[in-house]
Amino acid sequence: MDADIFLAAALRNSVNAILADECFRLALPDAWIVSGCLVQSVWNVKTGRAVDYGINDYDIFYFDPDTSWQAEDAVIAQLQGRFENLGVKVELRNQARVHLWYPQKHGLPYPALQSSVQGIDRFLTRNTQVGIRRTATGYDVYAPHGFDDIAGLIVRPNPGPNFSAASYAAKASRWRGLWPELTILPAKAD
């Protein structure tokens, strides 16, 4: 699988395309549709399921140097209003401010980020380290580890400063229940 095949499969889920188009229209800074909504759409295409099967929510990362809660909340309110007719849960997060709340919520360190793709790099699993964004000429696709795990239905841990073996096990268990074809690689002991 290459970037074009990945993108075509992810965009078969029209919600991903709608979200990307709207972020582009609004010029949301450094905005990316990320993670599970992309990977799970591709898994669904590969396994012959409905393209939205098993998707809990659709994640959008953006990067705005205004790290106030009020600024992020205003963006969330604006976009939620635009997306409410889609009938899906959309999660927006300003990656410039994740370090302000993540350690308290999860009990793990989270150094400040300088861009949205740095947030993608910190995902719990390598297969979900992907993002797409609409551009004036098409789409950008970000996938630092490529597409082999996605194409092979492989779930692999992404060790890093905010990795949690318990969270990985919970996510892998949920996914295995939905996509039994997955190969789940174990988290290494610390």
Image: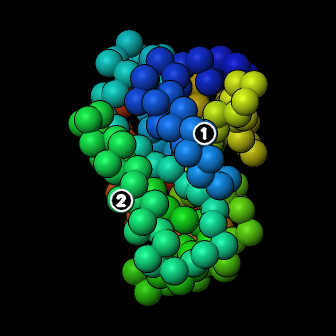
- Indicate whether 58 appears above or below 123: above
User: Residue, x 50% and y 28% (percent of image)?
Assistant: 17
Q: Residue 83 is drawn in which quadrant?
A: top left
Considering every residue shown, the one lying at the far top of the view is: 48
**Circle 1 residues within 10 Å: few <14, some 14–19, many ≥20:** some
User: Residue, x 34% and y 27% (percent of image)?
Assistant: 52
Q: Residues at badges 2 and 1 in contact (C-beta under 8 Å)?
A: no
Q: What residue would you read off at disc 1?
A: 24
Residue 28 image point, x, y percent: 59, 51
Viewer-side residue, 45 vs 70: 70
Q: What residue would you read off at disc 2?
A: 77
Residue 42 image point, x, y percent: 50, 25
User: Residue, x 32% and y 18% (percent of image)?
Assistant: 50
Q: Residue 104 is drawn in which quadrant?
A: bottom left
Q: Earlier in the sequence, mark 2 or mark 1?
A: 1
Q: Whole-Å distance between the Cαs marked 2 and 1?
A: 17 Å
Whether residue 29 appears in this view of the structure is yes
Q: Tell me the number on the disc at residue 61.
A: none
Residue 58 image point, x, y percent: 41, 44
Residue 174 image point, x, y percent: 31, 46
Q: Report the side of 114 relative to 155 (left or right).
A: right
User: Residue, x 50% and y 50% (percent of image)?
Assistant: 60
Instruction: Identify the secondary structure beneath mark 1.
Output: helix
Q: Report the side of 142 relative to 22 (left or right).
A: right
Residue type highlighted by circle 1: Phe
- Indicate whether 179 appears above or below 36: above
| Quadrant of the snapshot with the C terminus | bottom right
Residue type highlighted by circle 2: Ala
What is the total number of numbered labels drawn onto the structure image?
2
Instruction: Identify the secondary structure beneath mark 2.
Output: helix
- Indicate whether 64 appears above or below 106: above
Whether residue 178 appears in this view of the structure is no
